[in-house]
Image (spheres, grey):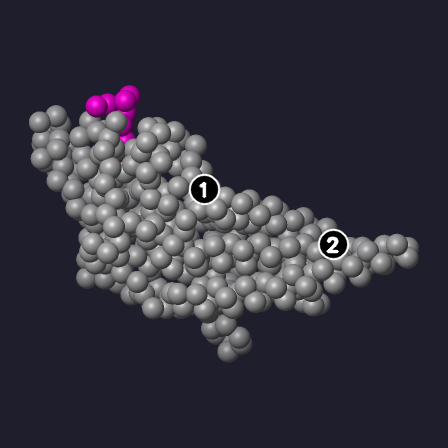
Amino acid sequence: MGCFVSTPKDSGGNRRRPGSIGEVSVYVPGLRIPKPVDFAQSLGDYLSKNIVERLSALRTRIVVMAGQEGPTITRTKRKSATQHGGSTLADLQQALEDYLLVLLGLVENGSHLQYKVQFAWVNQEDEAEETTMSNAWYEVLSVLHLMAMLLLSQSDLLLLPRTSTDGHQPKVSEESRRASVDIFLKAAGYLDCAVRHVLPQLPGELRRNLPVDLAEGVLRALCLQALGQGVDIQLGMAIDSTKATLAVKRRLACEMVKYWQQAQDNIMNLPLANGWGEKHCLFVKWKYIEAKAAAYYYHGLILDEGNTEKSQGMAVAALQAADEYFKESKKLCEAFNAAPPLSSHGAEIHHFGGL
């Protein structure tokens, strides 16, 4: 049950496209923006006035704050407060968590109320400008997706190199890197919940008509991206540690390869479009090749420690492969940054000091 409406991309001006998104360490494919909903008209005959007003107030706050943050949160915007009571990523995240707790009451125990409200959201990666569905599970899915995207944006901000007090090159602090790993894991948890527990609640017809932003493949890819980037940061910390062995670094690099390969497998055949989607595909491909370069590099260094002629030959081959993948990843990085909206690479983890 639950009808849906997809609005063509040329029917309105809700979807804003920035020309540039600045430095990027964590790619966030735009923020889907909720449109206003009249809960009183849809639910006024079924719920108490207090609950309806609570739902309305919570969602209206989200609509206002998300609209002010915009479909993308550039680092300049993230560091400045908005006019709506100092709206920040954390404020919007908290508003979404508060709303989700009340929203789940509409879908509890298969309540018929889940079909009473038409929920509309502006898309970013789909051809359709916006998608409207009369199903509260669609709203739950959209909220979880937005919560995850905000966490990825928060990690991106944490990984912005900052000028140190001693005047040395800007760098990312150890504290920020550790915090970003925790945030990546939390984002992956939201996305995994969306795939495992929310998508199955939607009827087959509605699942087929979800915008590509919420397609299972995209949600899985974003989950794997979060996991992959968390391991990426861990590898960077291992490189900076005098205690981490080559075996540990190789293991982390191989984990990255696994996550990014699965992410690429999940989105390579999806109709991602409108700049955000195309850039998303390039980001995943770039990070996958970069991870392969790191894995071959550390594998080669380990083989190079062997004393046999065979191990030495295998080490040379592995390091040559690493060099080729590294060169390819640099080209993909340039292609990613050149794809609209334009970007530059932010905090860089140097996996290949010897290449």
Q: Quadrant of residue 27?
A: bottom left
Q: State which quarter of the image contains the N terminus.
A: top left
Give the residue displayed 9% in from the left and 35% down from the top.
41
Pointer 1: what residue? 217
Disc 2 marks a residue whose amino acid type is His
Give the residue displayed 61% in from the left and 64% down from the top.
328
Q: Which of the two residues, 274 or 232, is positioned nearer the viewer here? A: 274
Look at the numbered disc 1 and give the secondary structure of its residue. helix
Give the residue displayed 38% in from the left and 50% down from the top.
149
Q: CA distance from mark 2 to mark 1?
A: 31 Å
Residue 297: x, y in percent? 71, 59
Q: Which of the two residues, 340 or 245, is positioned nearer the viewer here? A: 340
Tag 2–tag 1 contact (CB < 8 Å)? no
Q: Tell me which segment is drawn in magenta.
A: 102-112
Q: Could you tell whether 209 is left or right of 11 in the image? A: right
Give the residue displayed 31% in from the left and 42% down from the top.
142
Residue 224: x, y in percent? 51, 45
Q: State which quarter of the image contains the C terminus.
A: bottom right
Q: Is residue 133 above or below residue 179?
A: above
Pointer 2: what residue? 299
